Image (cartoon, grey):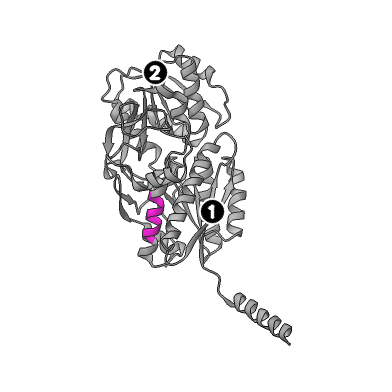
Amino acid sequence: MRIRARIAAYLFFVAGLSAVPAIAQVKLAFIDPLSGGAASAGINAQKHFTYEIDKINAAGGLNGEKLSINFYDNKVDPQESLIALKKALDEGARYVFQGNGSAVALAISDAVAKYNERNPGKEVLYFNYAAIDPALTNAKCNFWHFRFDSDVDMKMTALVNYIATQPEIKKVYLINQDYSFGKAVAAAARKMLGEKRPDIQIVGDDLHPLQKVQDFSPYVAKIKASGADTVITGNWSNDMALLFKAGKDAGLKVTWYTYYADALGAPTAIGRDGNGVVKVVTSYHTNVAPELDPDVVAFKKRFTGKEDEFAYYRLNTAFMMFAAAAAKAKSNDPVKIARALEGLKINTSVGEVEMRADNHQLLQPLFVATFTDGVKHDAEQTGLGFRTDIKVNAKDTALPTTCQMQRPNG
């Protein structure tokens, strides 16, 4: 009888467990390169996501629901990304995050819009934290896409406005990755230099395969032969680090104006040879204020590798805005979150930021900074860090848009 009673009690206990409702979760998907030449970008971002999600969950989640995330390796390939997106949607993701590769971003943005049209009531939002082809918030804009990084033209405007104050710049060489983003960087540089510094001669304009070049010495040889005193490049991850390495090995004497020289192995690659001659346009670096952002401090305590820099401060901004929009909407429904994000303003450690309602482009402060010694915080344990040359306030980064947003009814 005792045995039967124990069995009955156990069965009652198990039945009781199955009757307890599962803890509600907000499911996220991360689709970015975790292998191949762009892996440093994806792996670093993956650590940011782990940090941000753990922080939100420790504070109780969004409207009482915890965040969960699945990571998908897309090898920075649009087709692989669409396969990953389908898998993520099949597994219940309602928020998709991607950043590295504008060709990937264009594919995901279009696919999400089509999916939402076919699946009312199951809509998905796409949060883009690093893909900055201007088309994404202009001709290719859609309601379901939000960008948390400044676009190519916004950043090039800051760079060229600074270049316009540097009379020693006479000859510029352009070198960029051969896809939509790299082409946009080259086109913006040509147009804006022509407007602000028509005296500058563009002595070269190269496009190279994305994350496939292992030896940039032939490109560096062309730069040296051109007589360039300045290089403008949007290269990122391996393509930035290896370009720096080839330039250093060849003794190339130029000033570098870059989009992504501040992390992912680039500071390590150029080291002290970059002192005073590497510029970056960025939304954050560790010397923008006298004290480090508390999230930067906490991140570095958790991830202690040499190249574990807080490279994606804008991801911190994205999650701050995600949480603020959820609180404002009093809901975790993607459509309600999207409406709450439109026009949303929050304060960050670098100043106020705003999500534009007309094209879903974040307005945030931008900094042009120089890699140098004599700063409080260094990059990748090189002994050199970034010092601000100019700051552009968020409202001054806004550019006209051709976006014609089609919003869902209701």
Which residue shows up at 43% across the image and 55% down it?
Answer: 55
**Amino acid type, callout 2:** Val
Q: Which mark is residue 254?
A: 2
> Where the N terminus falls, by quadrant?
bottom right
> Where's residue 384, x and y in %?
37, 28
Please rate how many residues cluster around mark 2, counting C-alpha atoms within 10 Å: few if below 14, some from 14 to 19, many from 20: many
Residue behind mark 1: 29
> Where's residue 63, x and y in %?
42, 66
Helix, strand or loop at disc 1? strand
Residues under labels 1 and 2: Cα distance?
Answer: 41 Å
Residue 218, quarter of picture: top right
Residue lying furthest front: 2
Q: Which residues are magenta?
A: 317-325
Asked if residue 220 lies left or right of residue 292, the reply is right
Residue 392, quarter of picture: top left
* 195 or 76, nearer to the observer: 76
